[in-house]
Amino acid sequence: MLKIIWNKEEVENIKSKLSKDFDLILTDDPNEVPLDKVGIILDDSNLDKIRPILEMMAIERSQVLFQTPHGYVQLNVKDISYLEAFGEDIYLHGIDMTNQIIKQPLYQLEEILRPYHFVRIGKSFIVNISKIRYIRTGFNAKLDIELISGTHLEVSRSFVKDFKSAIGIDKKGGLK
């Protein structure tokens, strides 16, 4: 048997996702875990299930340090909706509708954020896949994506194939 123990506040944020995506038991039984903690109990035969859970938790808590014109800012990756290049400035758009000017090239930011499920959708845009609400077919083989915030962005033709691959859609439009 394997136990993983977290603070209750952390688990509340991802509880629905855990119970929907994984067949496991969450417990706050004081005989199993310390007070004010929540544990996940897995049968030894299901240890392979732990990797995606840990990866999800790591992404939920991950922070990245970005260079700005006035120094550095550390941001939670989950709070970033998309990045936009406008001239020489890179604007980081957060879920709370805040914007930061970042002083790093877009190609470097693409590499830094790729492990956190960000994908390039054009010469000037990188988007957080987890912030996408809808994907619609656009004109000229482009895609229109709507973010949870209501913002619409366009996936350029030259980026459509990589975008579909990143989100798990095959050529015929179905999920992989």
Image (spheres, helix red, strand yellow):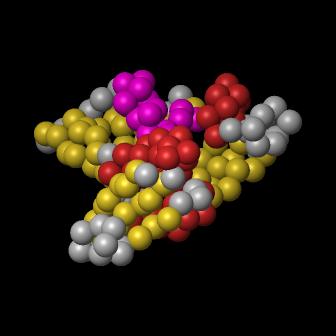
Q: Is residue 46 magenta?
A: no
In this view, 45 is above or below 96: above
Residue shown at 55%/47% (left/top)? 46
Q: Relative to the observer, which residue lies in front, 101 or 8?
A: 8
Occupied quadrant, residue 5? bottom left
Q: Position of residue 24 (x, y in %)?
A: 53, 60
Judge left or right: residue 75 versus residue 53. left
Is residue 98 shown above or below 155?
below
Foreground pick, 11 / 35: 35
Q: Is residue 35 left or right of residue 119?
A: left
Q: Which residues are magenta?
A: 106-121
Q: Is residue 114 magenta?
A: yes
Residue 150 image position (x, y, % from top left)? 57, 62
Question: Front-most of 153 and 75?
Answer: 75
Q: State the quadrant of the C terminus.
A: top right
Q: Main secondary structure of the magenta part?
A: helix
Of residues 112 and 85, the one drawn nearer to the viewer in this rendering: 112
Number of numbered discs visible in the structure rendering = 0
Point 13% across, 39% down: residue: 71
Residue at the spot 41% in from the left edge and 46% down from the top edge: 54
The residue depicted at 41 percent of the width and 70 percent of the height is 27
